[in-house]
Amino acid sequence: MIGAILFPPMSVAPVVSLVLIAGVLLGIRWMGSPTTARRGNLVSALCMAGFIAMALVEHGLLRQPWIWAALAVGTAAGLGLGLRVRMIQMPEMVALLNGLGGGASAIVAWMEVTGAVGLESGPWSCLAGGLGVGIGGATLSGSLVAAGRLARWLPQRPWRARALGGFNLVLLAGLGAVLIGACSVSGPPRLAWTAALAILAVLLGVFVVLRVGGADMPVTISLLNSLSGVAAAFTGFAIMHPVLVAVGGIVGAAGLVLTLIMCRAMNRRLGDILTGRTTAAGLAAPAPAPAAGAGPAPVPDPTLPAAAAASAPAPDTSPAAPPAPPRALGLEDAVRGLREARRVVLVPGYGMALAQAQADVKGLYEALVKAGKEVCFAIHPVAGRMPGHMHVLLAEVDIPYELFLEMEAANPRFAEADVAVIVGANDVVNPAANTAVGTPIYGMPVLAAGAARLVVVCNLNADPGYAGVRNPLYDSPEKVALLFGDARETVSALTRALTAAPA
């Protein structure tokens, strides 16, 4: 009786399914803004819970004790991870969840293809299920590798074995051949073919992600998110479940759009990222320096007659004394610049996440606003280790979302800014992206922080970022104040000095 009241008869299940699908879409829309993201996340989660409840009622599984045990274990694990995970660990958490989604789809598709819960599927259902096994298995293994890299359990450098590209192509071709073989047989042989399909898919996911460099990991996570949805959609085709097809398609399409947006923001091709062709190191060769003691050829003064020019004394070509190097700017210069500034742009990066300095950045922001400064935040699309990483960290400390500017809106602000404060950002503000041909970041649109009158850098050190390209901003002591050290300490010191009474 209670089940009949709580859950409608299956005759109206399609209507309820459409309502829940609409709820998922609405939740995704609300997730587009931090002001409504919590509401959107809650609505989408409730809709997914509704789908699970409908499936259990439809198949009469509510009286099965193992179902309740599985729900309890999964709920406890999810709550435990969600409550314990730190914001700095959120990228690997997202990668892990992508992998679990792909793995779940692969298991369901496996059971359908091999007939583990009934009759074996027909040819078309086998084809869709085989794609679910293949894509889901590759998503699972690739996501685990990505999570391991993000957690620094695995090396950050891409695996550049020469034969790896050809090996991956052989794996991909093998996947297609094995899929055809699995759908061409039945009984125990199909089980063997499907097992081979799953093994090849897992290997392909591992070796593809191993070729991706750490700087391109945000794009990889977005793609894996899309693939988890695609795997679910193919599994839905295999088991004839329209809700799984619809929700999987939504996730797959949204993830693919985000992947393409990020590739465009990085001036990357997705194929180059997946094949490791964006990680070639080395700067462009600098122009040859003139020979020692050689100066420019003397140019005759056109206002003098030829004879006078010929008899004019030769110009002094003795080497001039080198000019004194400019004084390096430090904390006092940064504070002075901020006190005199009217417009300030703050640029957060992955170093801020590593140092967990978002609260300190908020303290600096509040001090600047209290002093009457106009402040905004410039956020690069791939700043951090996952899409929206900086937005999440800054929203966590209640910085107003309307102050977050994407790259297209932020770059014109730098030319008008008196001070740009960089906190743990390197590659995304590296002007070498415009000049260093042959490097991983060449051609990538970057934040034009160097256009501000004064640049304050709160980075750990002057080492290159993930791309391995030195940042020329460090070589401009006349306008760049370098405050090297842990971002929490340097930003806090800057805030304390700014709020202290002037001497």
Image: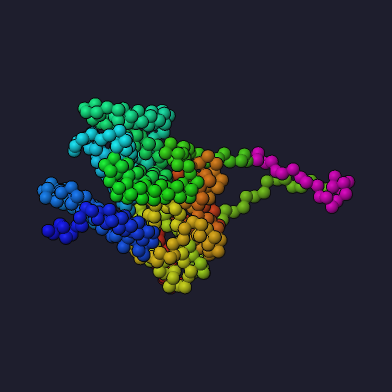
Q: Quadrant of residue 287?
A: top right
Q: Residue at x 18, y 47 (%)?
A: 59
Quadrant of the image containing the N terminus = bottom left
Give the residue drawn at x 53%, y 39%: 438
Instruction: Report if residue 293 lies within the magenta region.
Output: yes
Q: What x and y, as percent, mark residue 93?
A: 30, 49
- Residue 175: horizontal and vertical position, in percent? 34, 31
* Chain part drawn in magenta: 290-310
Identified at 83% across, 50% down, the residue is 302
Front residue of 133 and 200: 133
Chief secondary structure of the magenta span? loop
The percent coordinates of residue 461 (x first, y second) are 43, 51
| Numbered disc total | 0
Q: Is residue 401 left or right of residue 46?
A: right
Is any part of residue 71 visible from this angle? yes
Of residue 96 and residue 476, the one placed in the foreground of this image is 96
Answer with left or right where residue 164 lies relative to residue 420: left
Residue 441 drawn in magenta: no
Residue sitting at 45 percent across and 42 percent down? Answer: 270
Up/down of 13 relative to 230, above or below: below
User: Based on the displayed image, in which of its 4 quarters is residue 483 positioned?
Assistant: bottom left
In the picture, residue 458 is in which quadrant?
bottom left
Q: Is residue 147 visible?
A: no
